[in-house]
Amino acid sequence: MTRILLVEDDRSIITNLTDFLRGEGFELEAVTGQRDALERLPGGFDLVLLDVSLSDGNGFAVCSAVKREYGLPVIFLTASGDEFSVVTGLELGADDYIAKPFRPRELVSRIRSVLRRTGRIGSVIELGGLRVDTEKAQITKNGREIFLSALEYRLLLVFLNNRGLVLTRQKLLEEIWDAAGDFVNDNTLTVYIKRLRDKIEDDPANPTIIRTVRGLGYKVGV
């Protein structure tokens, strides 16, 4: 079972996330401050959910220790619009962030996405005849290997790690903007989605894996 350390000083968030994440199959332990977090880190966790403001100290110091000593993935919980905290957290090595207030199911999606990217859960994803081995970066379709560019591969992982969720074009741009060092705007995103469909769909003109949700974005079935 995946073990998560939640470092958060808001008791209501602790209570709600504890119940929800345990219901999703995660094992969760919560602490409220920097000192307690540093004491618990040797406990064999797989991921850290980390608030910036703590009852003592701050999340940045905890993130630095997590990355330096344990190499665990970190997701920051930040106040909405707090760009400074987001940038600082990412510079310290955080793997993702989510702004409060957040939807629990979106957080679960982010957690699973980070765990897959960091090789801490299921390295093989299968969907509609598509098989993606994230450890080997190998993709096959109905048993036949297919080859993707770095950005196409990153885009595919974004879709697969967010199965069941509608992804807006803006969200996709945020996820892949720096992949392979390429600049991606709205027009080139359309091109990459078409290229990806051409390679992974049985009938690219009538896609069943990456489906368009008219007026909203795209969705990959569960």
Image: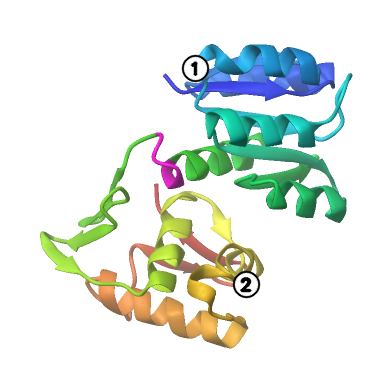
- Residue span colored magenta: 116-120
Marking on residue 129 = none
Placement of 66 over or under 151, stated as above or below = above
Is residue 15 in view? no
Tell me what residue is drawn at x 24 percent, y 58 percent: 138
Which comes sooner in the sequence, label 1 or label 2?
A: 1
* Amino acid type assigned to the residue bearing label 1 in the image: Gly
Placement of 85 over or under 16, stated as above or below = below
Q: Which residue is mark 1?
A: 44
Residue 38 part of the magenta-drawn span: no
Tell me if 129 is positioned left or right of 167 in this view.
left
Q: In which quarter of the view is residue 37 placed? A: top right
Could you say which is closer to the camera, residue 75 or residue 155? Answer: 75
Secondary structure at numbered mark 2: loop
Is residue 63 in view? yes
Q: How many marks?
A: 2
Q: Main secondary structure of the magenta part?
A: loop
Image coordinates of residue 208 in percent, x first then y, are: 33, 65
Q: Which residue is mark 2?
A: 215
